[in-house]
């Protein structure tokens, strides 16, 4: 009966108006979304759900207010469940940002097996705990007792990290992979064992020192030459490509502690002022991750030292091919990594005295190849060869190859080359004096009643026609143009011995000695009358010019005497060098009478020479 009542249309109108107002309040308008069905009147009696507005988040506006938009749901960093709007956003944002930055700088020792596998292209020395701080000024000293305590704490932390890594690896690793590794290590071939151990080291170097120890044990087996060679090559590749940093040396644990303690003092002096007693810092407590990383670096340095010990033992082996391969590995490590470079250089220089000529020649080649890549190592190489030359009971073979190494070094006009050339001239002078003393001792033995024949043969071997003398004079000739005036004056004091060599040595050595004397001549020779006039008037330079002029006159007199006694049947190379020296001396001489005498003597030799 109510259907036909006049109030029914008014009730439907009221319901529709309520629906339209609700739609307008939620942003749908009076008609609603396109394609959406109109709600039934019954839904108006239900409590409507709150529908959030979908708007683009404006970070610039939110940053000014100090929080995110309260209308949208927020995902807190480090959590999986979203947080509802309306919470304390500003307070929650600060610790979450700090946590995010810490997750980026997580150390390798704090990671599990899965975390280490995600470090693609990163090495252990790129870890934040492995960086070395720069310290200038007075360094802090940590008490030795505290250093030992920190060392024990670091070893324990590293062992815990290794145990955690091993347990996680056992859980994640496939069963088939475990069985394959166990089978290879039990009954696999030698190549498979070395490959498996190398892969284990490359997987996580910080947690794989036991694998390095196994490879060292294989490389130390002198009874098995093949196993030793393969183990050494595998270790060389691991140290070169995985374990050693390319731009710095490894540090021992004690130096690490001192360096970081000094850097901490520099950063916060006021905070640790109470713990200071002079330059000694007390209560220095780094994090466990830092200590474990420092302990790992210290242990890695010890392993590398053992590897070099094994490599040095193979250089003294009787097998030639093993010595030559070891020399190649030493030179490769010296070129590409700065760790223990002084020791590697010493190992290569020691092989200059090897009994096998091929090995000694290869050592010379390796040193020159190193200098081609690193020209700044010239002084280091010269000093190391000098130690070899002046060792007690050193053989003539080692001295000869050492001098050959020095006289073939290429110099330029740079500052480092001038220093190296000057130092090399000083080395040559010391060797020259040593040879002179040896000859004097042998001459004294002959005077005391020794056999004259034996003494003459020894004198000729030491100071006359040996290869050592030729290599020595060749090195002086090549280094003199690049040395400073100080070393040239020191060499001028030995001019008397050089003139003696010219008169007693055969033509090759005499030609080299004359070439050295020719470089010691003054640049401009003046006539004797001018020199005597300056000396009579009290000129200070007159005495010095008199000495230089006397050196020139003695040189030309000795050169003419050697030309007068020249044997044309000598080898072609010696004659060429000698005649070239005469040509240079005639061009430089300002005395026309001397030049005419040289020309006359050369013409006489040409007329008297056999066809």
Image (cartoon, rainbow, N blue to C red):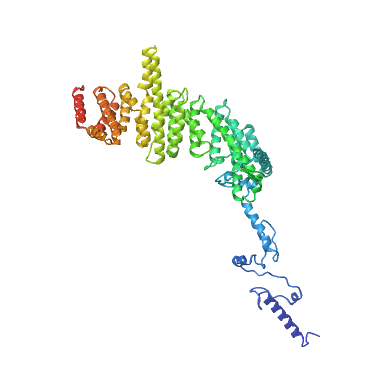
Q: How many marks?
A: 0
Quarter of the figure with residue 408: top left
Taking depth in this image into account, of 518 and 328 the one nearest to the observer is 518
Seen as rendered, the residue at the extreme front is 537
Taking depth in this image into account, of 570 and 45 the one nearest to the observer is 570
Q: Answer left or right for 564 relative to 446.
A: left
- Quadrant location of the C terminus in the rendered image: top left
Give the residue drawn at x 48%, y 38%: 335
Taking depth in this image into account, of 443 and 6 the one nearest to the observer is 443
**Residue 500 in the image: x percent, y percent?**
32, 23
**Residue 4 in the image: x percent, y percent?**
78, 87
21 above or below 354? below
- Quadrant location of the N terminus in the rendered image: bottom right
Seen as rendered, the residue at the extreme bottom is 6
**Residue 364 in the image: x percent, y percent?**
43, 31
Give the residue drawn at x 45%, y 32%: 383
Mark yes or no: residue 51 visible: yes
Mark yes or no: residue 204 visible: no
Quarter of the figure with residue 48: bottom right
9 above or below 146? below
Q: Answer left or right for 241 relative to 174.
A: left
**Residue 148 in the image: x percent, y percent?**
66, 38
Quarter of the figure with residue 62: bottom right
């Amino acid at each position: 009966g109510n259907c036909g009542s006049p109030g029914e249309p008014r009730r439907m109108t009221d319901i529709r108006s309520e629906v339209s107002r609700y739609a307008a309040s939620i942003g749908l308008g009076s008609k609603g979304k396109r394609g959406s069905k109109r709600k039934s009147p019954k839904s108006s009696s239900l409590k409507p759900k709150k529908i959030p507005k979908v708007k683009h988040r404006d970070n610039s506006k939110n940053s000014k207010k100090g929080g995110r938009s309260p209308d949208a749901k927020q995902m807190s960093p480090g959590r999986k469940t979203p947080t509802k709007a309306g919470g304390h956003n500003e307070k929650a944002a600060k610790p979450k940002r700090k946590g995010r930055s810490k997750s980026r700088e997580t150390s390798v020792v704090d990671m599990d097996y899965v975390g280490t596998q995600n470090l693609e292209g990163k090495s252990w020395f790129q870890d934040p705990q492995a960086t070395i701080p720069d310290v200038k000024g007075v360094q802090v000293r940590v008490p030795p007792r505290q250093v030992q305590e920190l060392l024990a704490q670091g070893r324990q932390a590293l062992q815990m990290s290794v145990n955690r890594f091993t347990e996680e690896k056992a859980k994640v690793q496939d069963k088939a992979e475990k069985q394959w590794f166990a089978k290879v290590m039990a009954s696999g071939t030698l190549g498979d064992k070395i490959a498996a151990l190398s892969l284990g080291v490359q997987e996580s170097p910080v947690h794989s020192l036991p694998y390095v120890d196994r490879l060292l044990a294989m490389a130390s087996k002198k009874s098995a030459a093949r196993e030793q060679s393969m183990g050494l090559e595998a270790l060389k590749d691991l140290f070169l490509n995985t374990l050693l940093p390319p731009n710095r040396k490894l540090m021992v644990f004690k130096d690490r502690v001192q360096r970081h303690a000094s850097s901490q003092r520099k950063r916060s002096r006021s905070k640790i002022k109470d713990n200071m007693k002079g330059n000694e810092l007390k209560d220095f407590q780094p994090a466990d991750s830092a200590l474990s990383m420092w302990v790992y670096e210290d242990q890695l340095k010890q392993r590398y030292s053992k590897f070099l010990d094994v490599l040095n033992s193979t250089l003294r082996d009787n097998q030639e091919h093993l010595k030559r391969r070891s020399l190649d590995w030493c030179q490769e490590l010296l070129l590409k990594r700065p760790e223990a470079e002084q020791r590697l250089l010493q190992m290569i220089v020691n092989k200059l005295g090897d009994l096998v000529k091929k090995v000694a020649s290869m050592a010379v080649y390796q040193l020159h190849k190193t200098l081609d890549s690193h020209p700044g190592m010239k002084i280091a190489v010269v000093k190391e060869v000098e130690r070899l030359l002046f060792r007690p009971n050193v053989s003539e073979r080692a001295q000869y190859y050492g001098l050959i190494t020095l006289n073939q070094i290429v110099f330029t006009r740079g500052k480092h080359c001038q220093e190296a050339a000057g130092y090399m001239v000083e080395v040559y002078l010391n060797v020259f004096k040593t040879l002179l003393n040896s000859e004097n001792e042998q001459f004294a033995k002959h005077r005391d009643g020794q056999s004259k024949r034996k003494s003459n043969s020894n004198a000729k071997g030491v100071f006359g026609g040996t290869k050592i003398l030729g290599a020595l004079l060749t090195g002086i000739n090549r280094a003199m143009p690049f040395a400073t005036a100080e070393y040239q004056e020191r060499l001028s004091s030995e001019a008397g011995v050089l003139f003696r060599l010219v008169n007693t040595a055969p033509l090759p050595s005499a030609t080299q000695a004359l070439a050295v004397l020719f470089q010691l001549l003054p640049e401009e020779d003046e006539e004797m009358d001018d020199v005597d006039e300056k000396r009579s008037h009290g000129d200070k330079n007159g005495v010095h010019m008199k000495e230089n002029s006397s050196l020139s006159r003695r040189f030309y007199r000795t050169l003419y005497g050697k030309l007068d006694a020249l044997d044309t049947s000598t080898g072609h190379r010696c004659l060429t060098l000698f005649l070239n020296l005469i040509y240079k001396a005639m061009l430089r001489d300002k005395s026309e009478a001397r030049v005419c005498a040289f020309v006359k003597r050369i013409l006489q030799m040409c007329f008297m020479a056999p066809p």
